[in-house]
Image (cartoon, rainbow, N blue to C red):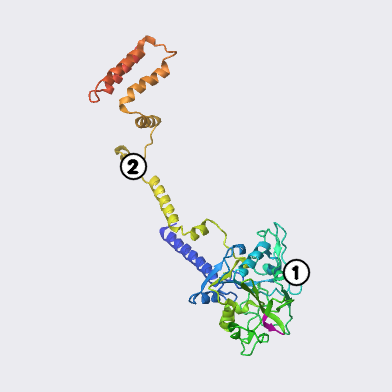
Amino acid sequence: MGKGMRLVLAVLLLCFALGVIQLLLLRFRAGDVYPPYSSLRSDPMGSKMLYEALGSLPGLAVSRHYQSLTSLPSGRGVALLLLGANEPFLRNGLEEREARSLDAFAVEGGRLVIAIRAMPRAVIGRGESEAPDRTEGKGVKSNDEKSEGGRQGRGSPRSCGPSADVLARWGVSINLLCPRAEPVRQSVERETDKVAEPRQETGGGAPELRAKLVPGLSGRARSELPQELAWHSPIVFDRLSKSWEVVYTRDEAAVVVERQFGRGTIVLVSDPYLFSNEALWRDRQTAFLAWVVGESEVVLFDETHLGVAEEQGVASLARKYRLHGLLAGLILLAGLFVWRNAVSFVPPHDEEAESFRQGSLVGKDSTAALVNLLRRSILPSELLAVCVEEWKKAFARDGEDAGGKLRRLEAVVEEEMKRSPRERDPAAAYRAIARILSERE
């Protein structure tokens, strides 16, 4: 392959990589990889516009909650939004400890807001038999979860504790009110999202289904609520306990209810459409959204009930504790280690340099390796004494001194060691030792 062909191939591979990266960025920028009503979605089915709008208000802190519902913060001054929760999640998709955590959040003064998403058409009217199985250690996805592209929901092996029906413990139940006519579905809804969540009619006329404000509600915030809201969900609330107060009704059935729970409040909304990006564009109900948030100083958008959770790994812990500098230092240290082992910082010897210039590198034999080892381990002044000692171990048997050689060798070494370092001549002493050893017995 010529140089020109290699250059063309490199350019094509670079263009392909850039194209793939751009496609991935476009997909995640739209956010349609996340479940409906997630605050990470910027398409009409998400609630990212509400997240960013609330975040731009002064004095209001907005964040997302990716941890388990058992790790909720203190509820004082905090509004927790669970947008798009479905009926199976509220009935048996929660563990008992998660339900207790929600209760504690509200009791401590938090405002718990749950906007319930309508079930798929295939599930409407089938009752609780479509709820995900919460067998210990195993789980089966509900039809609602299968319709969302196979995303893992609450009926997963992650859940291992006893389930809880928060609707029953809060004194409310869900029913379905069949509309007189099927509303218009959202124009951007994917085929996999088979939910009855239509958008408002765009022909200029009023939508067919309306939720009306219950007259006689007290409080300044409630007095500013709109008299009517466009409604797109068949879900209504019934069998309400006396603690609940109905805020909006549709066809005389409750669709928005509120109750005091300890020092906090719980708000149930049967249609999450008003929180979506499409609603904020087509039919923005600012007063209703302000009432939902209330006087909270912090707003949390929960993502775990939609299956979007952050797993604690090395990367997430590094981001949490801001260990980016440490990671960069470790990478730099690894690079220096590789460089040190790949490149010699000491100039080569003359014979090695000559070998490099000739295009070949001559290896060292075992003798050269032994010489290098001796040079590192034995001082020059001790070399003769070590040699005699090693000869004694190897050739002197049972303490016998054949021919008196050992005494003569030790005498040569002793005579050499008596001299000053400048007067010593190791070579002459070595020759004397060699002559003694070469003598025949």
In the image, residue 246 lies at what x, y percent?
68, 80
* Kind of residue at badge 2: Phe
Q: Nearer the viewer, residue 223 or 22?
A: 223
Q: Nearer the viewer, mark 1 or mark 2?
A: 1
Distance of mark 1 from mark 2, alpha carbons?
Answer: 81 Å
Q: Quadrant of residue 171?
A: bottom right
Percent x, y of residue 400: 41, 11
**Vertical comparison of 287 with 358: above or below:** below
Image mark for residue 128: 1
Residue 420 vs residue 430, the one in the foreground: 420
**For numbered disc 2, what is the local secondary structure?**
helix
Q: Which quadrant would residue 224 be assigned to in this image?
A: bottom right
Q: How many residues crowd around disc 1 within 10 Å: few (fewer than 14), some, or many (20 or more)?
A: few
Name the foreground residue: 110 vs 87. 110
Q: Position of residue 181 (x, y in %)?
A: 72, 84
Image mark for residue 356: 2
Q: Nearer the viewer, residue 17 or 80?
A: 80
Where are the magenta residues, as a range?
A: 246-251
Quadrant where the N terminus sits is: bottom left
Numbered badge on residue 282? none
Residue 441 showing in the rendered view: no
Residue at 40% x, 45% y is 341
Identified at 66% across, 64% down, the residue is 100
Say whether residue 263 is magenta: no
Q: Which label's residue is closer to the chain start, 1 or 2?
A: 1
Horizontal side of residue 157 vs 319, given as left or right: right
State whether the magenta stretch is mostly helix, strand or loop.
strand
For residue 344, above or below residue 431: below
